[in-house]
Amino acid sequence: MIDLSDKKVLERYLLDKGLIDSAVGFSITYCGGGVSCTVAFVQAGDRAMIVKQALAKLKVKENWQCDPNRMNIEMKSNAVYHRLVPDSAPAVYFYDHDNYVFGREAAPERCTMWKNDLLGGLLDFAVAGKAIRALSAVHNACAGDSQMRIDFGDKAIFHDLRISPYIKFVMEKNRAIVPFAEPIVDALMNSSITLVHGDFSPKNIMVDNRRIYILDFEVAHYGHPAFDLAFFSNHFLLKAVKNRQWAASYLDMLRYMLDIYYAEMAFMDRAELESVYVRLLALLFIARVDGKSPAEYITETNDKDLIRSLSAAILDRKIGSYPEMLALVGDGIARVGNRASPLV
């Protein structure tokens, strides 16, 4: 397999495939920040393109291996999103099976990452509404689709990139969560309900004048929708801990989105989904402190202790609905105030 992290190799690869032309002109810029792929922004004449190659070993401190064939999954799931919510997902250009390389339409360079907007205190409810409605539309449209169940039925990559590093790794470090975590792992690995994005988060949503571009579909699979909802929600809880002065606003935005999702959800029992969602969210919350992929902006010891405390409280009190969960998190953050002491 060729290594596209070498710029000369990438340039020759694109020239050989006719994706760039020296006579027309082109530019190649590597994109930083990701841990699972080599990613480059390619401007080829008037066309802007993202070229991604999956890494077999992820760029994290812990030893984290994963099948690079996940690029094929990303290509196929990106195509589904573009078909169902074309205004919110980029078009697919090509896929190279031999080298695990995927090319797609690039979001405009002027875009901002929604994660950065949120961390900076820009909470745009119009953007939030578009994001959650896109997720809801895909979940509803793909539920009960027998062909998608076949196409996306393999959960090996989901296990390697999400279950193992986020839940099982924490279970090994904290045996107290095992009784709560085992049924959730079982539900995630053995459910076939709808197409799950697997990495639906503000870091994978670009914003351009309130238009959104949903990206990074490599963990997609046919499974339990609670994963997307909890993985997404977790980022708002983390930011509420990080930026406590805006905690109420982050939680209000999350409630707004959850209200929309549950009102539109039409493919399974709400209470069943909500129960799995809340417990999974508690596990993912602590995983961004003690898992293989800690949130890079949660650096203070007191913030980490607060997250551990809130996660334990959600599980111990058997919280089963998102309004109860949001109230508990909001109260816990308010109680510690600016002193950042753990919840008691």
Image (tube, grey):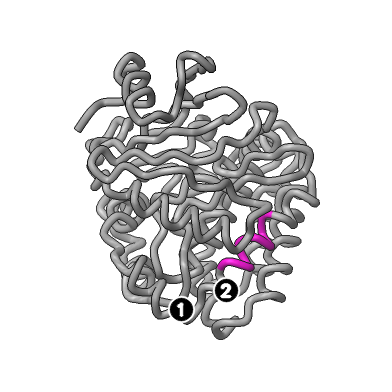
Residue type at mark 2? Ala
Q: In the picture provided, is 125 more to the left or to the right than 308?
A: right
- Region in magenta: 131-138
Q: How far across and down, in percent of the image, does residue 283 sit?
A: 44, 58
Q: Which label sits on residue 182?
A: none
Which residue appears at 27% of the width and 48% of the height?
69
Residue type at mark 1? Asp
Quadrant containing the N terminus in the rendered view: top left
Are the residues flagged by discs 1 and 2 in contact, CB closer than 8 Å? Answer: yes
Camera-side residue: 342 or 139? 139
Q: Which label sits on residue 145?
A: 1
Which residue appears at 26% of the width and 44% of the height?
68
Q: Is residue 321 magenta?
A: no
Judging by the rendered image, the residue that carries numbered circle 2 is 141
**Residue found farthest to the left:** 1
CA distance separating discs 1 and 2: 8 Å
Instruction: Tell me: residue 294, above or below residue 272.
Output: above
Q: What element carries label 2?
A: helix
Q: In the picture provided, is 54 more to the left or to the right than 103?
A: left
